[in-house]
Image (tube, grey):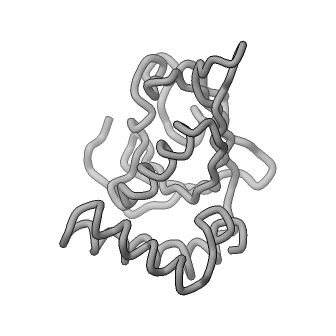
Amino acid sequence: MNKEMKNIEKFVSKDKMIVSKADVSGRIKYVNQEFINISGYEEIEVIGKQHNIIRHPDMPKLIFKHLWDTLAKREEVFAYVKNRCKDGEYYWVFANVTPSIVNNKLVGYHSSRRRPNLDLVKNKIIPLYDRLLKAEKVGGINQSQKLFEQILKEKDLSYEEFILSL
């Protein structure tokens, strides 16, 4: 993987869905062809690896904390995510992650991601994530969480209502 980040954006096709499946510890068990196409990884390079192999450093840790906390309650979660490609480029997705439950046992997670509204990402998500990242740099994830809770309280919305209202 190229550790150098490039300020070059790739775009998920409007009519395609990126799909991956992970075990309960976040190790990738399946990726579809769209995952391979956009990320630049070969299937053999990601199977068995932690899903954070595609995590972009511009993403606030708080978003992933919320994601994992929600999944731990066996609930689905939606999030806007900036992912990094193998070559250091990046792409945005609107992710829907659901727990996979078999015989009432959590066996992993299924993630379906599609191209988000890019104007919304530019005008609302990026400024929000920039604020959350600045708070994280000053006071860690707790500071970021306090800021986000304050934003949600001012809007009188839950996280889910906020994300789906954008």
Q: Is residue 144 shown above or below 101?
A: below
Query: Is 7 placed left or right of 119 in the picture?
Result: left
Q: Residue furthest right?
A: 15
Is 123 in front, or is 64?
A: 64
Across and down, in percent, residue 158 comes to: 61, 68
Q: Residue furthest top?
A: 103
| Image-quadrant location for residue 106 | top right
Q: Is residue 58 shown above or below 120?
A: above
| Image-quadrant location for residue 104 | top right
Across and down, in percent, residue 131 comes to: 37, 77
Residue sitting at x 44%, y 79%: 150
Q: Which quarter shows the N terminus?
A: top left
Q: Residue furthest left?
A: 138
Residue sitting at x 64%, y 55%: 94
Across and down, in percent, residue 87 comes to: 38, 43
Numbered disc total? 0
Q: Which quarter shows the C terminus?
A: bottom right
Residue sitting at x 26%, y 50%: 4
Across and down, in percent, residue 138 comes to: 18, 72
Q: Is residue 39 shown above or below 165?
A: above
| Image-quadrant location for residue 5 | bottom left
Query: Is 81 placed left or right of 113 in the picture?
Result: left
Is 6 in front, or is 57?
A: 57
Residue sitting at x 28%, y 69%: 143
